Each structure stands twice: as C-alpha cells, then as structure tokens.
Amino acid sequence: MSEKHTLDTIFDLAISRETAANKLYTNLAGRVKSPAVKEVFESLAKEELKHKALLSALKTGPLTQAKFKPMADYHVAESEALPEFTPDMPLRDAVALAMKNEQQAAFLYRSMAGFTSDPDMLTLFENLVNMELGHKSTLEDLFLDIGYPEVF
C-alpha cells in the first residue's frame, strides 16, 4: 500500500469521524428539551463541520498545514462515567457525553499512531489527537464550571 493511499485512508477515517460527530451532536440538539443543552450540542455540531472542512482541505494539501497546538489535558473526562442520553438530560450530563466522545476520538488517533513509524503519519496523528484534545479541553472547562460551580 502506498504512503499516499495510507494517508488518504487516514484522512477519510478522520473526516468520517467528524461527520459522525456532527450528526450525533445535531441529533442530540434536536432531541433535548433544555435550550442551554441544545445550544451546547448545536455549537459542537458546527465545530465538527469546521474540522471536517479543514481535514478535507488538508487531504489534498501538504501535511505541514495540519498544526494543532497541544492542549492541557486535565483528564476530567476519564474520571466521569459516560452518561446515557435522555431528552431531558441536564446540561452537566450533556457536556459529559460530549467530553467522553472527544476523549474516545483522541484515543483512537493515539492508538492508530502506534501502528506506524513513518514520521509524516506520526505528525498527522499527533495533530489529530491535539485537535480532539482541544475540544475535550474546552468541554472539560465547561464541565467544571457547570458540574462544580464555586460557592462563595
């Protein structure tokens, strides 16, 4: 299998994951009752479309354009159970669900990196992990604000 073919396969997988995440968040936004929860899911759906567009552009361009800075990972998602979706789920659970989804995406790309020693592919996977961890970090911050509000 050629390197180009392998990279195309990786990009196709990443693009399909972004599409699936967009569909998930759009579906959840349409099913929840809380306007605040709906807003969170709609915002996430839009972000996933931006990532899909970026990955589609990068698929045909040089890998050097795919740069995502590493984000601090506080491992909040790892300490939370995956909540079951319900139409009237509280905002805390909705954010936890999204946070776990981003954690799983980062784990997938990190796992895939373990199957290559090619420097370009390792860079690609590192950037995909950083992209997903960026979402996870944002969601973890929101989760901490919602789930553990300071009391004065």
Image (tube, rainbow, N blue to C red):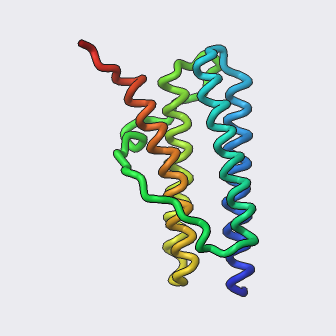
The quadrant where residue 70 appears? bottom left
Q: How many marks?
A: 0
- Residue 143, compared with residue 87, is above or below; it is below
Q: Residue furthest bottom?
A: 2
> Residue at (69%, 66%) from the top-left corner?
58
In front of the other: 32 or 136: 136
Is residue 4 placed above or below 16 in the rendered structure?
A: below
In-image side of 78 versus 1 (left or right): left
Q: Which residue is painted at 53% across and 18% down in the image?
A: 90
Image location (x, y in percent) of residue 101? 56, 43
Residue 130 picture location, percent across and down: 49, 58
Which quarter of the figure has residue 140?
Answer: top left
The answer to which of 31 and 49 lies nearer the viewer is: 49
Residue 21's place in the image compared with 27, above or below, is below
State which quarter of the image contains the N terminus: bottom right
Q: Is residue 11 above or below residue 119?
A: above
Residue drawn at point x = 44 percent, y = 44 percent: 137
Say which quadrant the C terminus sits in: top left
- Outermost residue on the left side: it is 152
- Image x and y of residue 53, in percent: 73, 54
- Which quarter of the figure has residue 7? bottom right
| Place of residue 69 in the rendered image (x, y in percent of width and height, measured from the top left) | 46, 59
Q: Is residue 121 left or right of residue 26?
A: left
Query: Is 111 placed left or right of 29 in the picture?
Result: left
Name the residue rendered at 71%, 22% in the picture: 31
